Amino acid sequence: MNNIRNRIEYQFAAFARKIYHHRIKTIFLMLIAIGALLSQLPTIEIDTSTEAFLHKTDPALLTYNDFRDQFGRDEVVIVALKPKQVFDVNFLKTLAQLHTELEENVPYIDDITSLVNARNTRGEEDLLIVEDLLENWPETEDQIQATKQRALSNPMYENMLISKDGTFTTIIIQTQSHSSMGVEDDIMDGFEDFEDTIEAPADTERKYLTDQENTQVILAVEKIVKKYRSGDLPIYLAGSPAVVHFLKQAMMSDMQKFMLLAVLTVSILLYIMFRRITGVILPMVIVILSLLSTISLMAISGVPIKVPTEILPSFILAVGVGSSVHILAIFFHHLRKTKSKEESIVYALGHSGLAVLMTNLTTAAGLMSFSNADVAPVAEIGIFAGAGIILAFIYTIVLLPALIAVIPLSDSKTEVLRKNNRIMDNVLESIGRFSTTHPKKILFISFCIIAIAFAGTLSIEFSHYPLKWLPETSEIRVATEKIDKELNGSMSMEILFKTDRENGLYEPELLNRIESAGDDFEKMSFKEMFIGKSWSVTTILKEINQALNGNNANAYTIPQNKPLVAQEFLLFENSGSDDLEDFVDSQFSMARLTLKVPFVDGILYDPIEEEITAYLNKNFHDVDFQITGLVALLAKTFNNTITSMAESYLIAVAIITLMMIILIGRIRIGLLSMIPNLAPIILMLGVIGWFGFPMDLFTMMVASIAIGLAVDDTIHFMHNFRRYYEQSGDPEKAVFETLHSTGRAMLVTSVVLSVGFFIYMFASMQNIVRFGFLTGFTILMALASDYFIAPALMVLVNKKRA
């Protein structure tokens, strides 16, 4: 095994010499390859939707897509107004103006509903009349009061268009379910109904409303609403499309801003450490090219950037800087001794090339274990972060030496650099002396700390509450919380009932069960989660029955005669209203039951969904049913995330352990080397538990960076310790030599990267604040593990040879 490693190190040194002698050709070929890759960068897309968390073939997503194809988009934009008096002539005129302006100027609208055009079903002698609530505009006080009475007595309006206490009213905007991108405007504009009957070619996949189109909708609504909002007329904008938009804007703003600050901070610290501009430029070139190349690979693969994949820049920054700094630290250190650029490049790659290869392969292999995750973005992080690491390695081993060879370097050493080196040497000397003379004490104290941290992991609570990522004063958070409180929810859960027979919904017994289910669901709750309202085709049927029985409130019931049910539905269809299309299919074989729920922690949806499922299994055993909608996807997404991440991390640890054994060549030492690898991760989890941080999607992602960096430092330490121990046979001497060589690079990268990530703590979004703190903390703990635990273990298990 030692001979194999020596031969590989020799090949790295020989490769470096070839790169040096063919540096211009190497740079030219690399730039052509990188240029071809980056040419695809402009085609990258962004998708922050909830359905983007699931694979395209996921049964839950396919069910949701079928639902959208049949009934349209379940996500709505809610504009809630709180005037001094809802039923006031002047306000109703303002409401009508706002309604019209939104209808005429907001793109991609499928339907818009408010008190202005709310369905008002009434009977007049033998006629069934379905009209708008304000079909006949009220002018007098008596007319206003009559309108108010009709509105407040209509159960469908309550907590939908008007709050129970009558102080809030809403405008509900439903957007198109399918995207208009690629659809050319032509002479058929305005004939949407005709266009909807034309089927797309079999080989053409219709795209659903895109993230970009959703943004256009919210921006248009926000612009119009601002003109009407005043101190006397508070207006709140909410609904999942709005939440998604504002979350995306805030997250992208914070990530972009603090990524730039992190890069700037890392650059400054690299300069302080190396005292050379090249010590800053070269690692940054590798990082930037690696990141852009990774995003280009995503674009080529048709994979959009999603919320979790926004950590890719941070990950590539961490790994890219780490690899290049290890090479540069050895290169500059040797350059000061030999004054020969060529020999220093050859020495640096011969010394650390194999270690860099193993760190990158191990981290990439660990991440690739995520590729089978049930949650699409997690799988994509595994694939593309792994690919990015391999690209960073290629650029570090091929492009970095070529750039060093062509860039003029000063071999003079400033007094400040000498002082920095003396300080670093003294620090490393002290660490080496302490870790080799007190190994048992170090391990005892370390295991005590790890045990305390492990106890903290038992207090970890899972959470997925994107709304709480935003500041408490955020407009969208305030609006959503207000609407959830005043109107009993801003999201919806959908239940599909399929009879699999034409006119199956004419059966009064089935309709009664659907009606009872809605009533029973409204009694369900779990912590902050509750069912605020339910409605279905039975709501329309009861309206029809009441209207046909002299508008008698006591007739607001489901007819118990099948022919009468069929007749009433037919009368409604003949009235000119197409509202039934929102509740049943054309064959009356499938119906939807909509449940209104608040925007709460995603982990709270699942218990309610399980309770609903148990109810449906008991009461609808003869009918096919499916729970779908955005809320159902949220519940499935988070449950899948927990399962996928747990499985992926276990696989990653197994793969990394195997590769550590292969690298070190001894099973016992390989297994022991996992202690400093796992220690920082356990400490990070302990902090999460003891400080009460929620274990959300972003927090889970920290561990992927932690694994990469912990493995990086440990492999470098073990690889060099093995080399020096074989040369001297003295474990203590091997520790000192390891710390004074690769230990310098470890210190530089850890300090630089931890400070770079701590910068994120100044972000406005709490998930990014925690991400920055936990990542920075884990990086420092990984360094401490390899400075103290790893040397202590090596001194105890490796005997001094005579």
Image: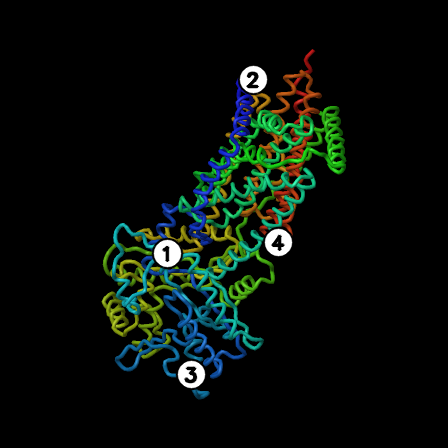
Query: What is the number of the mark on residue 355?
Result: none
For the point 48% across and 51% down, which residue is it?
607
Residue bearing mark 1 = 208
Give how far across and how far down residue 464 sits, in percent: 52, 51
Q: Secondary structure at mark 1?
A: loop
Mark 4 or mark 2, earlier in chain: 2
Give, as a three-letter code, the residue at label 3.
Answer: Ala
Give, as a three-letter code, the residue at label 4.
Answer: Ala
Residue bearing mark 2 = 2
Q: Secondary structure at mark 4?
A: loop
Question: What is the C-alpha distance between the residues marked 2 and 3?
Answer: 93 Å
Give, as a three-letter code, the residue at label 2.
Answer: Asn
**Vertically, is 399 above or below 82?**
above
Q: Quadrant of the N terminus?
A: top right
Query: What is the number of the mark on residue 146?
Result: 3
Give, as a three-letter code, the residue at label 1.
Answer: Tyr
Give how far across and how far down residue 401 sits, in percent: 56, 32
